[in-house]
Image (cartoon, rainbow, N blue to C red):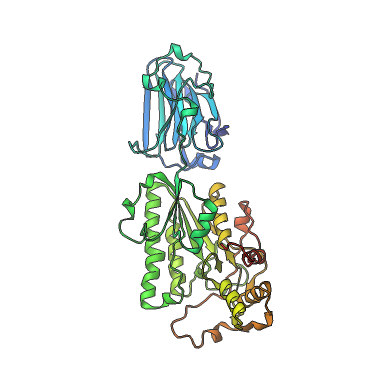
Amino acid sequence: MTEYGKKLAITETPIPGLVVFDLPVHGDSRGWFKENWQREKMLPLGLPDFGPVQNNISFNDAVGTTRGIHAEPWDKYVSVATGRIFGAWVDLREGPSFGAVYTTELDPSKAIYVPRGVGNSYQTLEPDTAYTYLVNDHWSPDAAYSFLNLADETAAIEWPIPLDRVEISEKDQNHPRLSGVTPIPPKRILVTGANGQLGRALREEFGDVPWVEYATRDALDIAGTELDGARRWRDYGTIINAAAYTAVDRAETAQGRAEAWAGNVTALANLARVATAHGITLVHVSSDYVFDGTKEGPYTETDPVSPLGVYGQTKAAGDAIAATVPRHYIIRTSWVIGDGNNFVRTMASLAERGVDPKVVDDQTGRLTFTSTIAAAIHHLLDARAAYGVYNVTNDGEPQSWYDIARAVFELTGHDVRRVSPVSTADYFANAAGPVAPRPANSVLDVSTLVATGYTPTTAGDELSRYLRPGHERG
């Protein structure tokens, strides 16, 4: 019999992401009522916001009706409208939990969320059982499916009614044993801007695995008009946008302004549209240039933006667009150093060539190494951190560009007295072309990131490592 009066509650299982819900059922002599799926109440308990697009019902006349173990590339929310089932779930996803098994009975007072790639099967325990499930994708002949034999000895499912006494389809009887199952791979991760400084760091962080795709502009024009049909987007779970227009001074010219808006805004709008339509997590990398630098103390994620120049305006506009995507991470960073031309390499080259530079001393911030950004992005995705804005820089005491230049000279064995301080105004006084305004304060507070369990290393330690002879910089 259906159990009345339960409180809404969630129970985790040995299969990661597979969770059981106790559902309040209210009944009397006339029958019963329940809220079978209630997004607002269930999300705080731990149900993913999985975005169902279809509701299916399987009606079963007889006791012992048994359905095979099928794993599809979408999420399910399974419940029973009438009757009772014995359910069995087997993890058929690629990874360490492959082959894990969970079984339980479901009646109208119980439901279960089945993540993508977990094999789902059941056996009816009462006649006239209506098995119902929500799914967040539509069936496709091109999708990747996996199946497991109901009698697999490794899974060793203890079916209440022996399989030789129940009705099973011939197809289900002939599914492979666990050793012959093709695991369901993770949803794909797309990294745009794969040849840039951050793109190369992301390659190093995520590695060459089949489900991570690295796209250059030549392979995928994210600012173009054909992005919607450029990929089978239902196969992607995350887009990490490492592509950006970063020529801050050129952005102040007529041509540069158009290029900056195309690269940082139009492209973001295209990615946001695709991500929203297909439930994809969008990771967007932002900049300290969204602030005017007049604040005393570090900027937090909730400080209002007030960009000074065109580049900062395009990054702020991109942030606003990215924030409309239901699943988004906006990564605010500053003073980026990676595998490519950058301030640190310039200073090291000047020191080696005997050039004594004048370096700005009235802008303050922290260096951010691309390896730190890539590792922080990986952490936020793996930890399923709350969506939103995260400041990501290396830690340590804030410094000026002048301080950093002196540190580069010292670490490379050169006299720090060769570096002279200069104000921003004097440094750019005789510039040949337009100069973008720079925020005087670019210090970002990283405590929100630290609260998720990721503590960035200090900028000084990373600078020493970066300049170490033989180190592959990134």
Q: Nearer the viewer, residue 457 or 161?
A: 457
Q: Residue 48, image x and y in percent? A: 49, 41
Is there any visible trace of residue 5 in the rendered image? no
Specify the farthest residue to the bottom: 430
Nearest the eye: 90 or 286:
90
In the rendered view, does 383 fall on the left or right side of 244?
A: right
In terms of image quadrants, where is residue 29? top left
What number of labels is visible? 0
Quarter assignment of residue 338: bottom right
Most distant residue in the front direction: 470
On screen, residue 173 above or below 136: above
Q: How far across and down, in percent of the image, does residue 207 sit?
A: 52, 51
Q: Is residue 206 left or right of residue 132?
A: right
Q: Is residue 178 at all visible to an observer of this figure?
A: yes
- The residue drawn where x is 49% and y is 88% is 430
How far from the left and from the top, in percent, is residue 423?
Answer: 59, 84
Q: Is residue 11 left or right of residue 228?
A: right
Quadrant holding the C terminus: bottom right
Foreground residue among 288 and 263: 263
In this view, the residue in front, 245 or 380, is: 245
Q: Is residue 447 above or below residue 116?
A: below
The image shows residue 464 at horizontal and vertical percentages of: 66, 66
Q: Is residue 91 above or below residue 448?
A: above
Displayed quadrant of residue 194? bottom left
